[in-house]
Each structure stands twice: as C-alpha cells, then as structure tokens.
Amino acid sequence: MKITINNKEIECQPNKTILEVAKENDIEIPTLCYQEGFEARAVCRICLVEVDNKLLPSCSTKAKEGMVISTESKKVLEARKINTELLMSKHIQSCFVESKEHELCKIAKNVGIRQAKFDSNKKTYIVDKGIAIVTDNNQCILCGRCVQACQMQNVNAIDFAYRSYHTKVTPAYENKLDDSVCVNCGQCLLACPVNAIYEKDDTKEVLKALKSKKHVIVQTAPAVRASLGEEFDLPAGTLVTGKMVSSLRKIGFKKIFDTQFGADLTIMEEAAELIKRLKENKNLPMITSCCPAWIKYIEHFYPEFLNHVSTCKSPHDMFGAIAKSYYKDKYKINKKDLVVVSVMPCTAKKFEIQRKEMKKEVDYVLTTRELARLIKIKKIDFNNLADEDFDAALGLSSGAGTIFGASGGVMEAALRTAYETATGKKLEMLEFNQIRGMSDFKEGSIIINGKTVNFAVVNGLHNAKEVLEQIKNKECKYDFIEVMACPGGCIAGGGQPIPTNKEIVEKRMQALYINDKNNTIRRSHENPAIIQLYEEFLGRPLSKKAEKLLHTNYIKRGI
Amino acid sequence: MQILKNSNFRALSKIAGMKPEEVIELVKKSGLSGRGGANFPTGLKLEFTRSSQGEKYVIANADEGEPGTFKDKLILEKNPNNVIEGMIIAGYAIGSSKGYLYLRGEYSYLKNKLQKVINNAKKIADKLKIYFDIEIISGAGAYICGDETAIIESVEGKRGNPRLKPPFPANQGLFNKPTLINNVETLANLPLIILDKSWNNSFRLFSLSGNITKPGVYELESGASLKKLINLGKPKNKIKAVYFGCSGGCLPYEDIALNNEAVKEKGAMLGSCAIIAVDEKHNIVDVATNIAKFFEYESCGKCTPCREGTMRVLELLEKISLKKAANEDLELLEELCRVINETSLCGLGQSSTAHITTALKYFRKEFTDKLK
Ligand code: SF4
Ligand code: SF4
Ligand code: SF4
Ligand code: FES
C-alpha cells in the first residue's frame, strides 16, 4: 500500500505503525515511552505526527492506505516542544547526566529547549537507596518503560500509584524496593530513558579501599570484556579484554583475575552435582544457580522447588571463597587486609554478596558502567591502552568459562565437562548450537553412559514460570535446566552499558563465542589452574572442603 | 417524566417472544442515541457488538462523574427497575449472559437497593428463560472511571486508566471480549422503547445547577430554549454565563436552543446535558481556576500533556488570579491548552481545556484585566 510522509510517496506493508514505516524509510521521529518489543503505551506524546490536521502518536497509530503524514509540520513541532517542556520541568530538578546524554536531554536539545519554561517539579520524593538499585522519583517522567520491563521479567515489583501529577512508580504499598519481590535484575534501569533508576554506586568505596594499605584484588566477569568498549564509543561486540586488564592495573588493583576461573570451578562442581543427582535420580530436574536474580525469583515465587536448584555458588562468589582461603593462605595475606572486588555486568550481584550465606567473600561489586566511571575518574585514555594479561593462576580460564556470559553458555560448559568426565570420552563437537542464541526457550538432549539427558535453557525470567509450572504438575521432561534472568544472559545484565538492546546484545554474544573458539583450552576440566587447585587444596569436586566453600543454601522468601 | 415510568419488567416478557435482531431493529428505529454525552446511535452499537464473536459482556456506566450532572442518580433512585431491565434487554440483544453495573463510589448508598432489584429481575428473567447475571462493581471515586475503557480496566481489577483505541470495546473490551457499554439513562429507555409505541426520543434530562435557586433535573425536549431552562431554575441575580459541566466549555448567557448542533456551533459541547449557571457576581477567572483544580486533581496521570499540563494550567491561572501574570503567560496558557486538547490520550485530557478556550473567546477581558 501507499502512504505519503513529508510529501514523499512511500510503499509500505499493511498493519504497521507510522513509526515503523518511518523508521524503515530513515525518517526520524523522536520517541520516549516507546520501547521495541513492547506494546506501545503511547503516553509521552513526543512521537507526534500530523494527519488530516490532527496530531497522532506515531508509535501506536497504524499507517493506512493513502494516509498523508507530516512528521515535522509547525503544529507537530510546537506540540512536541510543549510536551518536552512539560517533561523537562518534571525531571530537570535533579538530573545528573552520565557520560552519555540520556534520551530526554537529546530530544530537548533537538526541539530547541534551552531553558525550562515552567517552574521546576512541584513534588519532591525521597530517593530509595536500595542494596543494588536506586530509584529516584524526582527524575522520573512516568514513561512506564521500567514497569513494562519488570512485567516482562514476570516479577511485577513496580507499578504506578496515585493519579494526576502525584502519580509515581513504586513497589506495592510504597515499600522500599529491597522489601519487595524485586530480584535486582536491573532490566528496569536499562529501560529508563532518563536514569531515574540506577545501580547503587560503589566506586567511592572501592577508591577508598584502593587508597588504603589493603591488598585489593579484582575479578572481571566474562560479559564485561564484550561490552566495556561501548562506554568508550567502540562498536558493540568489540572484545576489550587486554585494555580492560591494563586499565584495572592502572587504577591500582594488586591482582587482576578472571571470574572465568570461577566459572570453570562452578562447572566442575555443578557437573559433578548433576552426575550425582542423575545417578541417585534425586531432585531432578536440576536447575542452575549462577544467576542471583533467578535465585531470588524462585525464593519468592516458587520456594517449594528450591531443592531443584544446584547448591553451587555463583562463579564470582566461588572465586571470592577461594581468594579468601586458598589465595590468602598461599600468599600469606592477612584476612583483614584482603579486599575482593568483582566487576560484573549485573546489579543482582550487589545484592548477592550481602546475603548472609555468602559470608562477605566478595567485598564490592562494580558494574560495567561503574568500571567505566572509574576509568574516566582516573582519566585513563582507554582506547589507547596496550593490551595486558590477567595475573597468573586465578586469571587462567577456559573457553567454557567465557560463554557463561551468554544465555545457554552455562549449560553448554556444564555439558562439555559432565559428558567427558562421566564417560571418559571426548566430545567430537564442542558447540551445542541448539542452545545458543536469543530464543526464549532452547532445548536438546545428549546421551551420557547410555542414558538420555534432556536439557533446556530458559532465556529471560518471563519464561521461567512455564517450566516451574511443569515441575509443579509433574510434567517436566528435563533433567537439567539453565535459567538466566536477563534476556540474552549476563551480556544483557542490568549493569551493562546503556543502551542495551537486542541488536547490541547479539553482537556482544557473538564476541564471547568467538573468544571461546579462539581459546586453546575449551573445557573447564582441562584448565590447568583448576586442576592444580583441586590437587593442592580442594581434593575433588563435592569434597567436604568444596561443599563448605563453594556451595550454599537458600531462603524460602515467599511473596 | 417519561424516564421515570416504571416498566416493571414487562418488556422482558415481550422480548422473550422476539428474536434479538428484532429487538435491535426496534431500538434502531426509535432513534435512541447514547445519553452519556457521546450520542452514538444505540441500535448500531448493539448491532456491532452482536456481530462480534464469542463471549460478550454488558456494562452499565453508572459512574456519573461530570460535575453538575446528576440525572443518572435520579433514575437509579427513582426508577432502578428500568436500568436493570435495560441491561437484560441489551444482553439479550447482543447475545451476552453477564453484565456489570459500574456504580459511582459516591452512589454506594444505592447498592443494597439495586442488588434487590437485580435479584428480583433475575427471578423474572429466569422464568422467561432469559439468562443474565448482573454484578455491581463499586467505583472508588475517580472521575476517569467514567471513561468506558477506564471502566473496563477497573472492572478487571486494574488501575482505572483509559486504554488506547482501537481496539474498541465492541471488538475487544472487558477481559478482551466484545463489550457493550451504555449509560444509565440510555439503558433505562430500552424497556420503554420496547413497550411504548409513543415513546418520545426528543426528551432530554437536564441537570441544572449553579447560581439559581431551584437546582434539579428537568426533562425538556431537545432544542428547548436555554432561557426557559434557566427560568425554571429561578436565578436571583443576572446570569452571565452557562457552563456545560466542566468539560463542555462555557457560553455567554443568551437564548440558544439546547441541542448538540446549536451549542457546538458556538464552540461548546452539550455533552451529558449538565448546565451550570454563573451569575454576574462571579469572575470567570475564578471559575476557570476552580475547574482547572478539578482537572488537575482528576487527571489519571497516564499521559504527559494531561498529567503535567493540567497542573501547569492551574499554576498559570493562579498566577493570573493573583495579578502576577504578564501577557506572555496568557499566551503560554493558550498554547498549552491547545496542546493538551490536541495531544492528550483520552477524552478527559482532550476536553479539560474547553472551559478555558471558550472563556478566553467570550470573556477575554476578565483575564486581561488581571494581567500586570
Ligand atoms: S530490578 Fe528487575 S525485578 Fe527489580 S524492579 Fe527492576 S525489573 Fe523489576
Ligand atoms: S523510572 Fe524511568 S523508566 Fe520508569 S517510568 Fe520513570 S522515567 Fe520511565
Ligand atoms: S488525557 Fe491522559 S492523563 Fe488525562 S486522563 Fe486521559 S490518559 Fe489520563
Ligand atoms: S513514543 Fe509514542 S507516545 Fe511516547
């Protein structure tokens, strides 16, 4: 069918919104409340276009045969400007601009706002400073993207309350987020166009520790190296492992280690646990435990199935436990003096480290964004850094550890090791392509010692309910299930650079798989540092010592 | 009053012998149109909803919230039988067996009485093999819940916010099923149409209030003169302006015909036939400020222009009242009103500035007199 946009005739498919058609034809219409992959709420009224003398939101209006549309008529521009003014006056009061300008600021600049026309916000709110997530209603422009994101996660921790300009986004009963069912996944903050939700900042604490006489070591998660570059304007999917390591050295960390070492360790324990459960036919399906947001989700919503969850701590916490035992003893460091910092793509890890069960094995979690902030505070010219390597031993890892960062990666890594250690045979094909990629739900099966093991990968929390209901109804055919809360896995975590969208996530994912492919060690059980750790210290997977240090238990939280 | 003639469920026995299509035809012929303010032909609405597939619902909109409107209250108090009977007739016509009566929070004192009527109606309908259940849902005092899609959200147990249209309720309404939503007065007329060949479509109920001594509901023919109505209200002082509720805007008091076309031609909207008279003792800026407070308070908060805009409109009007405003403030007010009207998501926001636009058209001097 044909429509006309800005005097240009355009051929388009039926059943598309004006915004979609405009986008396909490189006609830019600014949007604020609209986010791809979600139903248009059409509330910000920024994406206006003029049709028949009427102003319509292009994000929710379907293009119709013969429509004559203007995206930049005087009427459009005037109305867009007023609506932007209205939002700016609600927001501006306490706006802090991150390294990158946020979406509203950009729009304001484009429509030519230099000074706010209306007085600043009439209402002020107390900022909710959570353990992992901070919400500042003073900056919120009520676009609803966070609410949609949280609905998408099937958590529904936040929603609108009150009406008129008293409207606010809040957990039920205006409780604090920490007292709600929020799982700290941070998907809401990735969705927010104005930074009204952000991670609890720990850079100051870390800088303080670095200034002290303490022995401060750092570990970095696999997903960070695939995204940190974006904070320095490198294209998505650029691996910056070497530069990341050298910047961390410059910042002043004593040792730079790799959480992938922890991931390899997790695989050793988890694969052994799986084989044990398969043998005993107990607590099956086993479900992975490396995502703290997922853990809090099941603790709240399905506590009756916590026995299915692997008891393994998450990789960075395993690392922390080893650092504060094996490493501390080996290098004769005073317990008081050892500080472990994790750089993670994830906000939920901030919550995880203060769980009682974790015994403060990791002292601080910095997100990818916070690390970028540190690098900028220290005025390090990131893009011109020479590549450097992780420190020995706890910095050595396999390709299996790398792919932990992507949805399906934990499963793939675990299967490589479970198969080979249980059968004593080598896998001919290391790649499990059926569980890679961005689909919501992925599955497959493998025969281990004559027994078929069915496995599944749940990509994003919103798909978890289905398998949990299967378990409830005793209809679950799987033996082993991976769940990652963030859609795409940790590379799409709440601590990652903004924007994080599907396109960018796919590029980051690609980078991790290439990294795995190029690694000479691709199986966790072949990582010599891991072998050495078991020989010198832990004995074997699931040994008493391993159980004590590397495994944990959970809390029945309920709702 | 025609509307207060108690049909006493006699229309039910009559429709029991009719096909639903015949009922719809009768309503179409009668010329009845929505009395909530939108004036959509009721027969057509029935037909549309009937032609949608699957399970369907009927909702009676008894959330009469427009300031100055109280005609539905009168009907619910004095002739509830017709309302309930009207719901059952509507259900029969569209092929639905479940209805909800969405009762304004402030009218909850009527709940027990209405429940009795429902129970009684059910017995009679069951005997006629017309199966229809009605549930009363209480509103919680939000003006926005007079909007049909906000009612739907509210009945579903959600926050009372309007939905985007399309989809329209006739296709996808309550629980995403085809839904017929009608105002109390519209429904109460249905049994009368079925029973009475002499039923007169031109009667309207006018809710009259303001600076008069005899406020109340008056039944007049559509197109009756405004003067006649105001005189029935016996004003003490000279009337200067009339407001059509809060959302219909205002006109200077002169003798015009009270029908949609005549009022619209002057730039206002007759809507649900609420007339608020304002006498010479009152300043229009004060009235405007008062109405602006109402909208600022009642905006549901969903979309930018209405949520933020109504608050800024009030701010500007207060500034004018306090004689602190300059001409550019007035210009900003006008621009803001235009954008709120043109870009708000639902009818509430869109109509929230009509009272200012019309006041500035007819009583501009009262505003400019207050500029600094
Ligand atoms: S962090 Fe996750 S669970 Fe918590 S409010 Fe945000 S989206 Fe919801
Ligand atoms: S917190 Fe951010 S995403 Fe959520 S409604 Fe406010 S501005 Fe939108
Ligand atoms: S116009 Fe917007 S804010 Fe106002 S009531 Fe409608 S949806 Fe709510
Ligand atoms: S992006 Fe269309 S109304 Fe917000």
Image (spheres, coloured by chain):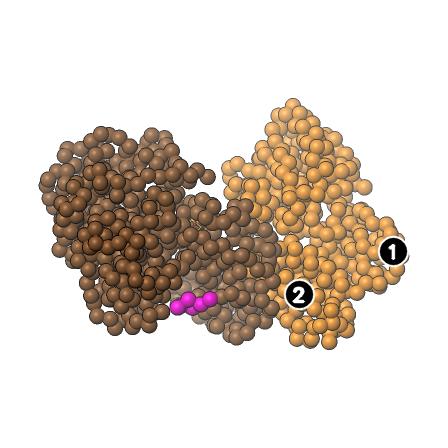
Chain colours: A brown, B orange
Label 1, secondary structure: give it: loop
Of B328 and A178, the residue lying toward us: A178
> Which quarter of the rendering shows the C terminus of chain B?
bottom right
> From this viewpoint, which residue is outermost toward the left?
A425
| x, y percent for residue A19 | 45, 62
Residue type of the residue flagged with mark 1:
Pro
Residue A98 on the magenta span: yes
| x, y percent for residue B20 | 61, 35
| x, y percent for residue A40 | 47, 55
Q: What residue would you read off at disc 1?
A: B235
Of B268 and A228, the residue lying toward us: A228
Residue at image point 22% right, 41% down: A546
> From this viewpoint, which residue is outermost toward the top?
B127
Residue at image point 40% right, 68% down: A100
Tell me the chief SS of the magenta region: loop
Residue A48 against residue B207 in the figure, above or below: below
Q: Chain under label 2?
A: B
Left/right placement of residue B35 relative to residue A189 reads: right
Quadrant in the picture for residue A370: bottom left
In the image, which residues are magenta? Answer: A96-101
Residue A422 on the magenta span: no
Q: What residue would you read off at disc 2?
A: B315
